[in-house]
Image: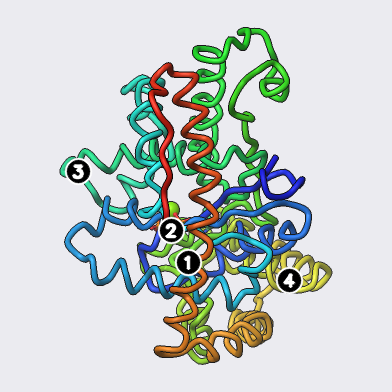
């Protein structure tokens, strides 16, 4: 529970690896955040330190991306008066917890983490990625646990990370808080554990495909429809999607990105009808489907575009700076409390400190 409200907490966030967020973020995580803002004490984190794992030579870009993503949050309807916006780099407790948590995770287990492995492959990092790249997975455990949340709304690609975070929480509780090995995860706090063992809350669409039809829609892979894209850009990106029948069956696969978008953005019955047409081997007019999708997606994005327009330029930048400062200050109170309690459990509590931001 939060020290400031009686609501259970949520933590989730985005890495500023691009100027804005895309439709995958919307159906995978943002929608859940919007719905949960009243019921939960929500913390939304900009993982700007983690952006350095792939953009270490582009600090200007990371800064601009940070501002762009917070503008997207505001445009989507995340409300800084109800939820707390947190800048990772200004929450030192996260960095400190990362080091202790790194001791609770076997190195080889981190390196086998399927989310990390997929990222290394799809982002073409080869074997030259920095030491900090796999470290971010450990850091993410600290991002989450610093806020002792119960739920983490994420897309499916993050499940392995949340599993790792659950392992860290459970191990910490067992090793340092005297929680027995047989205590089920949901009872750890009752049994004296510091950390609730948090659960992933997967979005309405667990993994939205990118316009390349191969990978998940991703900020870094050039296959995304962004929430800030103009009407024309949205339609252009949809029109470029290739739709080919599988030579073995003569049918367009039901897993095709276009059909995923129909499920995600058209009324249920209409999406089912289109799926049935493709499954029946009819000569479906792809262009018509793309136009219908374009209209539906643009209708979804229209109010976001309007709100984003009010955040243009310096006025918008100042608003972003203000919500980040206000949120991060509140977040530090929670994260510092967690760190203080963790240090007590670790027997390194030789004096509390006060932080301001
Ligand atoms: P990057 O390419 O830099 O990894 P990303 O597009 O994967 O960027 P993240 O910042 O890593 O975005 O993810 C933010 C949140 O959005 C996470 O909870 C993630 O699971 C979710 N998410 C990202 N892409 C998708 C997608 N295509 N479908 C569903 N959820 C997604
Ligand atoms: Mg990602």
Q: Quadrant of residue 17?
A: bottom left
Mark 3 and mark 4: Cα distance apart in space: 45 Å
Give the structural element (helix, strand or loop) at label 2: strand
Q: Is residue 14 visible?
A: yes
Q: Residue at x 65, y 17 (%)?
A: 192
Q: What is the spatial separation of the Cα atoms under label 2 and label 4, in whole angstroms?
A: 43 Å
Q: CA distance from mark 4 to mark 1?
A: 43 Å
Read off the residue under disc 3: 130
> Which circle's residue, 2 or 4, is located before the other in the chain?
2
State which quarter of the image contains the C terminus: bottom left
Disc 2 or 3, which lies upstream in sequence?
Answer: 2
Mark 3 or 1 closer to N-term?
A: 3
Please state if 30 lies on the left or on the right of 157 as rendered. right
Residue 87, labelled with which disc? 2
**Residue at image location 31% in from the left, 46% down from the top:** 121
Vertical relation: 90 (above or below) 308:
above
Mark 2 C-beta closer than 8 Å to ligand 1: no
- Disc 3 or disc 4, which is closer to the eye? 3
Asked whether 49 or 109 is in front, the reply is 49
Q: Check the image and report above or below for 98 versus 319.
A: above
Residue beneath label 4, please?
A: 274
Q: CA distance from mark 3 to mark 1?
A: 28 Å
């Amino acid at each position: 529970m939060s020290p400031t409200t009686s609501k259970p907490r949520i933590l989730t966030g985005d890495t500023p690896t691009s100027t804005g967020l895309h439709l995958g973020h919307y159906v995978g995580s943002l929608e859940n955040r919007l719905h949960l803002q009243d019921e939960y004490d929500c913390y939304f984190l900009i993982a700007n330190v983690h952006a350095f794992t792939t953009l270490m030579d582009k600090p200007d870009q990371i800064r601009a991306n940070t501002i762009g993503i917070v503008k997207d949050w505001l445009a989507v309807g995340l409300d800084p008066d109800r939820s707390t916006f947190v800048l990772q780099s200004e929450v030192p407790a996260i960095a400190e917890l990362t080091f202790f948590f790194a001791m609770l995770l076997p190195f080889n287990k981190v390196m086998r983490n399927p989310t990390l492995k997929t990222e290394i492959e799809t982002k073409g990092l080869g074997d030259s990625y920095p030491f900090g790249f796999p470290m971010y997975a450990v850091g993410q455990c600290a991002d989450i646990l610093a806020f002792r949340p119960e739920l983490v709304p994420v897309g499916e690609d993050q499940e392995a990370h949340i599993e790792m975070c659950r392992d860290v929480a459970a191990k910490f509780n067992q090793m340092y808080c005297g929680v027995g090995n047989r205590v089920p995860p949901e009872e750890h706090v009752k049994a004296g554990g510091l950390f609730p063992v948090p659960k992933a809350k997967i979005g309405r669409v667990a993994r939205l495909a990118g316009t390349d039809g191969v990978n998940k829609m991703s900020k870094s892979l050039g296959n995304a429809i962004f929430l800030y894209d103009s009407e024309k850009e949205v339609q252009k990106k949809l029109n470029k999607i290739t739709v080919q029948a599988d030579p073995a069956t003569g049918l367009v696969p039901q897993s095709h990105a276009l059909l995923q978008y129909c499920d995600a953005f058209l009324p249920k019955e209409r999406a089912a009808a289109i799926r049935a047409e493709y499954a029946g081997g009819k000569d479906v007019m792809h262009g018509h489907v793309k136009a219908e999708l374009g209209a539906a997606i643009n209708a979804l994005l229209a109010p976001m575009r309007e709100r984003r327009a009010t955040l243009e330029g310096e006025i918008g930048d100042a608003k972003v700076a203000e919500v980040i400062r206000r949120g991060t200050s509140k977040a530090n109170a929670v994260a510092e409390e967690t760190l203080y309690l963790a240090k007590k459990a670790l027997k390194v509590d030789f004096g509390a400190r006060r932080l301001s931001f």
